[in-house]
Amino acid sequence: MPIRKYFRKLFRIKKNSKLEPFLKIAFLLLAFFLLACSLIFVIIAKDLPRPEKFTEHQIFQSTKIYDRTGKVLLYEIYGEEKRTTVPLETIPEYLKQAVIATEDASFYNHFGIDPEGIFRSILINFRIKEPTYGGSTLDQQLIRSTFFSTEKTATRKIREIILALELDRRYAKDEILGWYLNQIPLGQNAYGMEAASQIYFSKAISDIDLTEAAVLTALIKSPYSLSPYGENVDKLLIRKDYVLERMFQEGYIDKEQMEKAKEKTVKFSTPTTIKAPHFVLYIIENYLKPKYGQDLEYLKENGVRVITSLDWDLQEEAEKQIKEGALKNRTYNANNAALVAIDPSNGEVLAMVGSADWFAEPYPEGCSPGLDCLIDPKFNAAIGTTKSIGRQPGSSFKPFVYAAAFENGYNDKTVVSDELTSFGIWGGKEYVPHNYDGLFRGAVTLRQALAMSLNVPAVKVLTGLCGPNVTESINNAVKMAENLGITTLKAPFGPSIVLGGWEVKLLDMVSAYGVFATEGLKALPVSILQIEDYSGNIVQKNNKSLKRVLSKETAQLINSILSDNNARTPMFGPRSHLYFEKYIVSAKTGTTDNFKDAWTIGYTPLIAVGVWAGNSNNESMIKNQPAATVAGPIFHNFIESALDKISETQG
């Protein structure tokens, strides 16, 4: 039917009537209105993102650094967003229901928009004269968070509606719900439910309960103003109860479930952004940056999974023992401490603590981190030497020298004389070492000398039993230490090296002692087990193999001496911190002659552990406090706890 004829019939206007001119005007106005609407639609819809290409939208995902289980998240490397995408089927059903009940109850029934909700929001906004309420469906919220800003304008709203309609037409409801749950912003730079669950509850989204699901859903409304770490945590919990009520009203849960979930206490994780910080930063600086570049842009966007060697249970125990031990050691003016634990069979670093407390302020209050501070929390004493000052191992260096002598044909029954001895001029001074207690014992076996950590016999072993002459003997001992894993020794060398006069790293020392634990097999320190890309494909895996660097016989001899409690009793007493009732542990202490560094390092075939105690600024401890007193208790408590755990694990 022609349009003009249709209008005549609609308004009951006869042909050639006096109202005919008005009909023409109405027709022209209608045509103009339709043209204007078309132009507005074209302008608004111009350059819209293509909803048919929604799945091509790049979703940046942060890189996650995990412990050895792949479950404990240590740190995220991200740009502006922390995000981890998970399959919809791993998200608990009650979380999906909570979101739908609260945000879009008719989600499975509408076609991308909810006309009734939009009309209702228009009336409310008109009444309060502000564009506050949007009546948005999950489709619209997803479109908004993916393609648009949060600016509330009519143009953006229309564009949002157009795309929501198209999105709903092209994709299944579950696909849309899955995208929504993986992309919605939830505060603390977290995007998606998995990232939020890790931040707020330190658990995977698949492990949350109904109450926690309600909390995460409550955050959708206003993730920053309702943050559990701000002033409005009570408002968050009120909103949580509202979510549970909506679930009850929509029939997803019964009244008993609702009341029980309301009453349950919500435990939020401490808002720390990093676990095992010294270890994590060690990995980033030494492995990830060399591989992926200094700015780590690739890791910020591509969702890489880094599975480390760290045993989180042992790490927590190490942090506890270091913190408590350093606090007790303030009595001796030894304020800082560090610990490294390694699995000697493969070199995997199980725990690393670089200071008394990473999260503490520098100590004492007001000091400048570095040379002024007794504790510089951020400096990693486990892998560093010091900032322009040496970190010396004391007598803990001696086993390397004795190993060189044993490799040269001597054994634990070889006798040397413990007596006042001048070893000539070294560095412009006559070198005349003394034992720790100031006594001399005459003829002693190498077993006695090493077990009691006698200094004069150790220098005699270094200068006379490791090679055909003094120079070669010292060089052979140095070479032995380097073969076992010490990386910091610098020539020229002198006889004081056997007493720990050269600079070392705690990580190197523990790794080198690990060679004794494996009876001569060396495994370089390993901190990353494997790296996976976003799809779970392994792109890097630790395939390091063991290498023999010491004879089995020599290693066994060192092990026997360092675990011989009877042989060390004359110096350390029968029940020192090196003695264990339940386990056979080989151990050695080291104290520098100026009491600046205290070490205890020991091992079994299952674990090698080293502890350093002292001060970040290299200030001396109170004298007459040997390593067995300062570092020994930390070492003893940790390795005993670790061996208990390992024994339980192995049945």
Image (cartoon, helix red, strand yellow):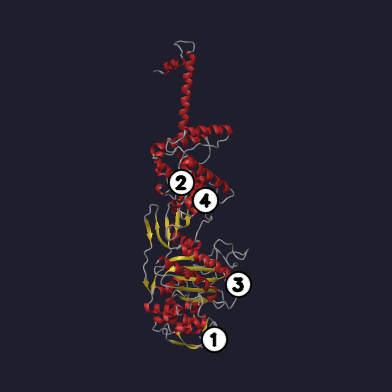
Label 2 sits on residue: 95
Label 4, label 2: how many angstroms apart (C-alpha)? 16 Å
Label 4 sits on residue: 264
Find residue 501 and report its horizontal and vertical position in percent: 51, 77
Residue positioned 37% across, 79% down in the render: 553
Left or right of 33: which side holds 554? left
Q: Quadrant of the N terminus?
A: top left
Find residue 380 and report its horizontal and vertical position in percent: 52, 65
What amino acid is labelled 3 in the image? Thr
Q: Quadrant of the C terminus?
A: bottom left
Circle 2: is it few (<14), some (14-19), or many (20+) Cα within 10 Å? many
Q: Pointers 2 and 1 in contact (CB under 8 A)?
A: no
The vertical placement of 514 against 36, above or below, is: below
What amino acid is labelled 1 in the image? Leu
What amino acid is labelled 2 in the image? Leu
Q: Pointers 3 and 2 in contact (CB under 8 A)?
A: no
Q: Secondary structure at mark 1?
A: loop
Label 3 sits on residue: 331
Q: Nearer the viewer, residue 440 or 69?
A: 69
Label 3, label 2: how many angstroms apart (C-alpha)? 53 Å
* Location of residue 5 by image quarter: top left
Q: Secondary structure at mark 3?
A: helix
Circle 3: is it few (<14), some (14-19), or many (20+) Cα within 10 Å? few
